[in-house]
Amino acid sequence: MAEKRKEVCILAVAGMLGSTFDEKAFRCALEKNPDMIGCDSGTSDSGPYYPGAGKPRMNRKAAKRDLELMITEGVKRNIPVLVGSAGTAGADPNVDWMVDIVKEIAAENKIHFKLAEIKTEITPEQLRGYIKAGKFHPLEGAPNFEEKDLETLTRCISVIGAEPYIKALEDGAQVVIAGRSSDTALYAAVPAMYGLNNGFAWHAGKVLECGTLSTVFEKHHGSMIAWVREDSLSIEPGNPEMAASPTSIASHTLYENSNPFYLPEPGGVMITKDSVYEAETDRRVRITGTRFEKAPYSIKLEGVRFEGYRRVVIAGVEDPLILKQFDSWLQKCVDRAQEKIQKGMGLSKEEYKLRYLVYGNPNDPDTECVGVVFDIIAKNEEDADGIITNVWHTALHEPIEEWTGGQSQTAFPFSPPDLMTHDGGATYSFCLNHIINVDDPLETCRITYYNL
Amino acid sequence: MKKLYELAKLIRSKNAGPFVLTLDIMFDDNETYEKVKSTGVLTKSNIAKLYDVDEEQIHQHDIPLARSIKFSFPRKYPSGSFMDDDLYGCQKHRKLVELEIPVD
């Protein structure tokens, strides 16, 4: 059990791992002797594909560059290194991907340390247990999710709090790579471990998790440092040429949330309603008045469902006589394509998804070209290919009555005209926005240690 | 009459998680912030009409320390779902940019 401290210094190297953080700012920040070096590595902002596929949205070389700097310095100076929501989605394969990189870094630099890997996915069967026990509740805006939906649940990832990080550190880990975590909890963990599990630890985490986004002018993307105390917190950017101001920090508290005053976290709620932001220096801000109220422990779940295989076509339409009747012409293209798909492929409209998006205003007389995107999702790749080909080929030759004779209507920018997204077009959707009540903050984790 | 973009320092929209859209209107000085608030244009009722959402589903927060007004409501289509056209929910503030505000 760690001793109690009156002040803990925490360092965020950037808002996102793999962003190639400012090295100069990092080295300046290290001179302040932080008690932890951290980085958030994930987000749900880039959509359901990354958790669905278990793939990272960051370049491996860039991620390695960032991790190498953090780990070599952390190990050298005996400062714990914490990374949360590994590899964008924080799913098990994302954690594996990052742990591989860490093992390479250890071998190539010939450094030795204890690594903790924290995986946070739960199986559909585990989720069934919570549902049956009445411990599964929707958050605002949550899609409907019942026990039967477990059959189509591709992946469920729990968003862990600070306790698993504390456990790993108390078990002697020097580097922690964790799956999906509360971005704030990643930073609150070390202060909490030293007895400062208060509003200031969580508020520091809330600001630090975005790196220098909360500075007055983000000249370089990089380090933010905070000092967490019993009755206050101070925060400044690592780069001495950059500054935090009371307005810039207060403004950041409202970023990407629906209620900036009442921010639920695993194990409690951070309340910033009475927070006071003052300039401690011309670049450092002091915050007082933030509270953390404990609440029965609940963990948020992110869940994705496989939806099928996507194909997309982009086309430019320039003929002014088509643009004058664009909506009805597009609808004719779709109707005729769907008839052919039914007759030629035996697929009814209900067996696949089709939509189109129009970019540009066909009703504006100054418009010379309108972009249309046809987007389909089918159950398998063969159907997806067949459907999209039907769609673009139909659009290509769908005539208007104003012209007599064979017409070609769509300008495709490349060959083949149809595109697929990654992994053969595998597409997912978010199907959970729920929490589970837990008795033990560690019950959704699997922690493994490696002596590297 | 002024347009909102002439008065605000930043108008933006973003996801607050994949299921909720949040709109922020931020001002540089307290006087403009208070004046705009007092015109009664930026209300849940008007946001409901502009964005075709139920007024009861809208949360509004005034944040004096950041001189900001925030509106949040459930997204019509969750981020990255088939009918969604804006993954990050970041271009949904368009309807606010040229809103007419009755100030000098």
Image (cartoon, rainbow, N blue to C red):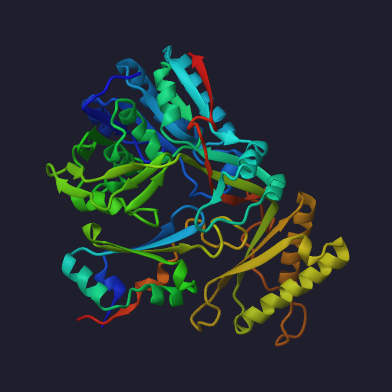
- In this rendering, would B4 be left or right of B32? right
**Residue A289, above or below A71:** below
Q: Position of residue A350 (x, y in %)?
A: 77, 64
Q: Position of residue A426 (x, y in %)?
A: 67, 47
- Residue B103, image quadrant: bottom left
**Residue A84, above or below A329:** above
- Residue A258, image quadrant: bottom left
Q: Position of residue A129 (x, y in %)?
A: 64, 38
**Residue A323, above or below B70:** below
Residue A407 visible to the viewer: yes
- In this rendering, would A74 be left or right of A242? right
**Residue A81, above or below A383:** above
Query: The N terminus of chain A is located in which quarter?
Result: top left
Residue A243 visible to the viewer: no
Residue at position x 54%, y 65% from top? B76
Residue at position x 40%, y 76% from top? B45
Q: Nearer the viewer, residue A224 or A256?
A: A256
Q: Position of residue A89 (x, y in %)?
A: 53, 40
Q: Nearer the viewer, residue A80 or A287?
A: A287
Q: Nearer the viewer, residue A283 or B22?
A: B22
Residue at position x 47%, y 27% from top? A177
Residue furthest front in the image: A133
